[in-house]
Image (spheres, helix red, strand yellow):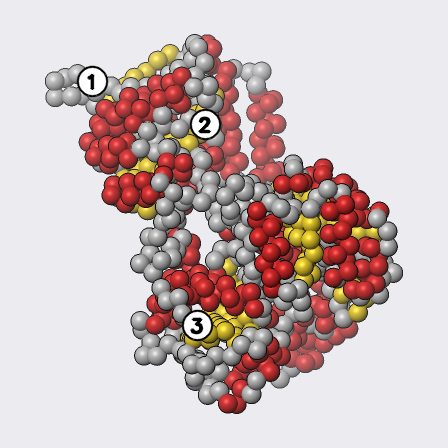
């Protein structure tokens, strides 16, 4: 008997060991003879528990071998009489009241150790009845419920009150989504002694869970999860499906539910219920007013606040050059603006330089900062011939800075320097600036610090990332919409297209895609198959060249899907007009060349057409991020990625590492091979059979075959041990020690720490490769 006996409900087969424990207590017992209908299940489960415990206690490495023999021995004796338990079941242990009566507890009709489905069907207990019956015997109760109304909690208020009066904990998580939760219901729960936290996330459908966890002794804990919110119809009369899960049968499921609840409770996305705040926010949402919770006119979401706290902690620890990594679409500029606002209160002077590489990004960023500071005149642009006059708060393009004489600018003129898309920082134009200025605070912003050329962006920050929110976590947290990714074989043969400087020659590539209408018609056909209503979609198509973008826009428009092509050199009014027409539904697709890879917000885009070969994981995530921003009436972003036959130099593993959030080539290969079983909530991905074969072959071909490539691979993966490096890359030990090389040498050339050399290191290390055959 592993669990300590205490007053409450139980569902235990009475064994010899349990009988001895019961004899040690003066609690009143609720015993019942084992029913014939339950005998097979209860007794076989008892044997299974005993066998499982015995095998778990065997030495590691022996569990399979000895456990198999144990089961054989058991099966050999099953035709002989066994020492059975005594045929009783313990249903409860109760105290006596001062009056002498037994303090019995209500029992649900479903035994505590059974998992079952409740549907409110005639002849079976309602979900409301079972929940009420569970309350009285629970030590603590956790409830996560999208909607709560008084009609749902009223029938169980008395039971909940008694639970709280005897010291039982009651925690409730709920939301204001669609304003279905009633303040009066929350008021009554708080009045009972319950703790309530609320998510005020109006912009999405973050929480839809409906679940209860009734905590008791570990094996007697029960949980409910299903479709029933806390409303009268859902609890009593609705056609609802709810699964009652017993920890005795499904301990991992119940344990995960408890852990997820604790994670939500501590996440910061739910805040303590405040009646005045709740009513103010829900009423203002109903009337259509814009919510401004922050005194600076910008409302930080909890994850943004958490990231800024991490940056502030880094500064408190003495680091004044910090990198903020946050997935595309999670509001890096908003966080930078609020961070600057707070720095102004601590710095004696706060001259600002904000650096980006496109005029649209600078204009949007300046507007965000002006809103944060409530100063419509804040900031000056330094881009395309526009020059600042006061040089107090400058939003400058890196090209304008590079073309100027930085020697005329004092190194400490700017107190705060913010560099957007910091993964570009190793380019010469950025290095020239960063090597010149010495601000009090430097903040780098990027969604993807990794570079495909192997250069290390983190060197400037001592290898540190101050605050980090990656794409997968952003989608799982509900900060971005999920994606539906389709990898489609398009039949193109790119193996003979010239390859220069790490990529296909653009003009030659364009010739393949625009030679005739076959390829464009295939793209149009796939759009019509994969997108529910192509005429109403809001899509971005990423093309190779201007000629390619114009070609695709013409073919789509001719097919009845209104489209336009724009690019970096298009007049500003044409670019603005295209985005406005896309938003208003006059256009279905905007085809572009390198214009929307970074920085420019187009939140209502719900479809992405990846029409150019992109092996860079950074560029792929930037393009994907264009469609993941949350917007009204957008629940998913559809991504159509066209897969051709590529040269061996082209690396699909980089793209899928980025998509899947993995460094390990072997893990990526397994995901692709098994059909992407592990994706963020709501996401899906599929490759057609030919595309899957092409991608898998590309991943296998991507093994770093040269020493230089292996150094770059280790630099990308980071400071790991040899075993991890081999399993992550798929390399063999011989690959590391070939031609007199060593692991220490690989680490040294990758810029990682190595032990100090001894006098005999050179001779010994050269001989290390001859020992690889030793087991």
In front of the other: label 2 or label 1? 2
Q: Give me the disc on residue 227.
A: 2
Q: Give the image location of residue 154, x and y in percent.
A: 27, 24
Dot 1: element: loop
Label 3 to label 1: alpha-carbon separation: 76 Å
- Residue 412 visible in rendering: yes
Circles 3 and 1, Cβ within 8 Å, touching? The answer is no
Can you identify the residue that label 1 sits on? 102
In depth, the one of 719 and 430 nearer the eye is 430
Q: Give me the disc on residue 379.
A: 3
For the point 38% across and 48% down, which residue is it? Answer: 290
Dot 2: element: loop
Circles 2 and 1, Cβ within 8 Å, touching? The answer is no
Name the side, left or right, on which 563 lies relative to 207.
Answer: right
Is 547 located above or below residue 381 in the figure? above
In front of the other: label 2 or label 3? 3
In depth, the one of 256 and 102 nearer the eye is 256
Residue 661 is drawn in which quadrant?
bottom right
In depth, the one of 197 and 355 nearer the eye is 355
Q: Give the image location of residue 428, x and y in percent.
A: 62, 79
* Quarter of the image that includes the C terminus: bottom right
For the point 70% across and 44% down, which residue is it? Answer: 561
Is 135 located above or below residue 654 in the figure? above
Dot 3: element: loop
- Label 3 Cα crowd, 10 Å radius (few <14 / some 14-19 / many 20+): many
- Residue 651 visible in rendering: no
């Amino acid at each position: 008997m592993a669990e300590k006996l205490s007053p409450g409900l139980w569902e235990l087969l009475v064994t010899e060991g349990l009988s001895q424990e019961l004899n040690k207590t003066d609690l009143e017992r609720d015993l019942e003879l084992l029913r014939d209908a339950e005998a097979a299940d209860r007794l076989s489960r008892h044997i299974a528990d005993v066998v499982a415990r015995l095998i778990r206690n065997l030495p590691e490495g022996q569990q399979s071998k000895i456990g198999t023999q144990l089961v054989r021995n058991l099966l050999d004796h099953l035709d002989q009489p066994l020492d059975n338990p005594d045929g009783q079941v313990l249903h409860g242990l109760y105290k006596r009241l001062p009056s002498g009566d037994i303090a019995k507890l209500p029992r649900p009709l479903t035994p505590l150790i059974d998992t079952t489905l409740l549907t409110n069907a005639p002849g079976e207990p309602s979900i409301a009845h079972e929940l009420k019956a569970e309350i009285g015997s629970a030590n603590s109760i956790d409830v996560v419920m999208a909607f709560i109304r008084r009609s749902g909690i009223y029938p169980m208020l008395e039971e909940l009150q008694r639970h709280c009066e005897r010291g039982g904990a009651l925690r409730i998580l709920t939301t204001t989504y669609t304003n279905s939760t009633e303040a009066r219901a929350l008021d009554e729960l708080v009045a009972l002694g319950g703790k309530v936290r609320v998510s005020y996330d109006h912009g999405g459908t973050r929480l839809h869970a409906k679940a209860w966890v009734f905590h008791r002794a570990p094996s007697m804990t029960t949980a409910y999860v299903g479709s029933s919110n806390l409303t009268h119809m859902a609890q009593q009369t609705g056609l609802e499906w709810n699964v009652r899960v017993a920890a005795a049968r499904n301990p991992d499921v119940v344990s995960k539910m408890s852990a997820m609840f604790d994670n939500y409770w501590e996440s910061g996305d739910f805040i303590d219920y405040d009646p005045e705040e709740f009513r103010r926010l829900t009423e203002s949402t109903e009337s259509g007013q814009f919510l401004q919770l922050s005194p600076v006119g910008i409302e930080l979401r909890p994850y943004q606040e958490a990231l800024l706290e991490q940056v502030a902690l880094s500064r408190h620890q003495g680091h004044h050059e910090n990198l903020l990594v946050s997935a595309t679409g999670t509001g890096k500029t908003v966080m930078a603006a609020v961070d600057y606002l707070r720095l102004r209160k601590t710095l004696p002077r706060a001259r600002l330089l904000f650096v980006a590489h496109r005029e649209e990004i600078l204009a949007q960023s300046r507007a965000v900062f002006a809103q944060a500071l409530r100063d419509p005149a804040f900031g000056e642009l330094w881009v395309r011939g526009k020059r600042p006059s006061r040089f107090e708060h400058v939003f400058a393009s890196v090209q304008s800075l590079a073309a100027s004489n930085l020697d005329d600018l004092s190194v400490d003129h700017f107190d705060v320097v913010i560099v957007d898309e910091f993964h570009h920082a190793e380019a010469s134009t950025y290095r020239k600036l960063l090597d010149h200025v010495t601000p009090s605070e430097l903040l780098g912003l990027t969604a993807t610090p990794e570079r495909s050329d192997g250069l290390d962006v983190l060197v400037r920050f001592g290898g540190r990332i101050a605050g980090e929110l990656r794409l997968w976590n952003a989608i799982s947290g509900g900060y971005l919409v999920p994606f539906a990714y389709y990898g489609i074989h398009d039949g193109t043969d790119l193996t003979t297209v010239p390859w220069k400087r790490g990529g296909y020659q653009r003009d030659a590539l364009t010739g393949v895609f625009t030679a005739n209408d076959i390829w464009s018609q295939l793209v149009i056909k796939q759009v019509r198959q994969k997108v529910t209503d192509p005429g109403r979609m809001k899509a971005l198509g990423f093309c190779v060249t201007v000629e390619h973008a114009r070609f695709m826009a013409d073919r789509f428009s001719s097919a009845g899907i209104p489209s336009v092509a724009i690019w970096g050199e298009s007049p500003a009014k044409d670019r603005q007009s295209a985005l406005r027409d896309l938003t208003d539904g006059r256009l279905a697709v905007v085809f572009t060349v390198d214009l929307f890879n970074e920085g420019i917000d187009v939140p209502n885009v719900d479809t992405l057409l990846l029409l150019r070969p992109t092996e860079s994981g950074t560029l792929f995530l930037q393009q994907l991020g264009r469609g993941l921003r949350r917007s009204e009436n957008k629940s998913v972003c559809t991504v159509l990625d066209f897969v051709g036959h590529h040269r061996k130099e082209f690396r699909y593993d980089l793209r899928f590492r980025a998509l899947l959030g993995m460094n390990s080539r072997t893990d990526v290969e397994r995901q692709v091979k098994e059909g992407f079983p592990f994706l963020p909530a709501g996401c899906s991905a599929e490759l057609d059979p030919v595309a899957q074969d092409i991608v898998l072959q590309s991943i296998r071909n991507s093994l770093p075959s040269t020493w230089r490539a292996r150094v770059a691979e280790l630099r990308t993966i980071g400071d790991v041990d040899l075993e991890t490096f081999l399993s992550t890359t798929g390399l063999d030990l011989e690959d590391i020690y070939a031609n007199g090389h060593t692991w220490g040498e690989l680490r040294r050339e990758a810029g990682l720490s190595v032990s100090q050399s001894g006098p005999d290191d050179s001779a010994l290390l050269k001989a290390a490769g001859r020992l690889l055959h030793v087991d």
